[in-house]
Amino acid sequence: MEQESTGSGSSKFSSLQWVFKVKNMAWEAYKSKPFSHWVLLFLSSLGMLVAFPASSLLSRVYFANGGTSKWIISWVAVAGWPIPALILFPMYLFHRTSPTPLSLQLFCSYVFLGFLSAADNLMYAYAYAYLPASTAALLASSSLAFSALFGFWIVNNKLNASVINAIVIITAAMTIIALDSDSDRYPYVSNSQYIWGFVWDILGSALHGLIFALSEWVFIKFLGRRSFHVVLEQQVM
């Protein structure tokens, strides 16, 4: 009984140590950046959490209600570009921030990334035309795994245990969906269309991950700095 009590006490003590360690690491990370950094990070994360599910649902609603144009869905995916521009221009006016000089190499990089984004949006449009929103969204989450892999190959980002674990889980989820693909198919979607929906979704996710890695490479190669207004400039361009 005494040994069991001692073991239980040491387990609780080690758990508390781990909690305090995580708390101290989080506090040190918080202090290492200005408060404005965390505000912008929160707003950016909130925007992504709202925008991506809304885009998936609206795309599926469009096709479910008789819409047929993949080009419209591809264009709507980037129709919000004036919003970053509206945020960017006041930063030039009131925060004494100068625009990044637009060299020929940087301009060509933006054009190339733009064409890749257009192709990526078109692939996703075909995916949402043939797949339910839940299936398409889960398959699209594989872009995180592709982003980690392309980031490792192109910009030498580290692959830690948590990233590898996420890649394995996402791959397993896609495999389960493929094995049970008949359960959520719409009746008007043919077998070939459903299969192509899977193919376009995975290809779009791979291209999405490549765009993230290439964007980071552009930052490192041509910009040499990473700041909020530089990210907005790239999105607007």
Image (spheres, rainbow, N blue to C red):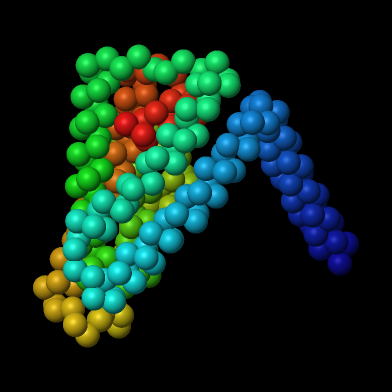
Give the number of callouts: 0
The image position of residue 136, as x and y in percent, is 31, 65
The picture places residue 206, in percent across and down from the top left corner, at 26, 48
Residue lying at 49% horizontally and 56% vertically, measured from the top left: 50
Asked if 26 appears above or below 33 in the picture, the reply is below
Say whether residue 162 is left or right of residue 72: right
* Pick the front one: 152 or 227: 227
Q: Position of residue 181 (x, y in %)?
A: 26, 76
- Image quadrant holding the C terminus, namely top left
Q: Can residue 223 be seen in this view?
A: yes
- Please state which of residues 69 and 140 is positioned toward the viewer in this rendering: 69
Q: In this view, does 73 lie above or below 13?
A: below
- Residue drawn 22% across and 85% down? 187
Residue 178 appears in the figure: no
User: Residue 63: horizontal and vertical position, in percent?
Assistant: 26, 71
Whether residue 116 sits left or right of residue 2 in the image: it is left
In the image, taking residue 36 as reference, residue 47 lies left or right, namely left
Q: In this view, does 64 lie above or below 13?
A: below
Question: Which of the pair 156/59 is nearer the observer?
Answer: 59
- Name the quadrant containing residue 213: top left
**What residue do we see at 63% from left, 36% from top?**
38
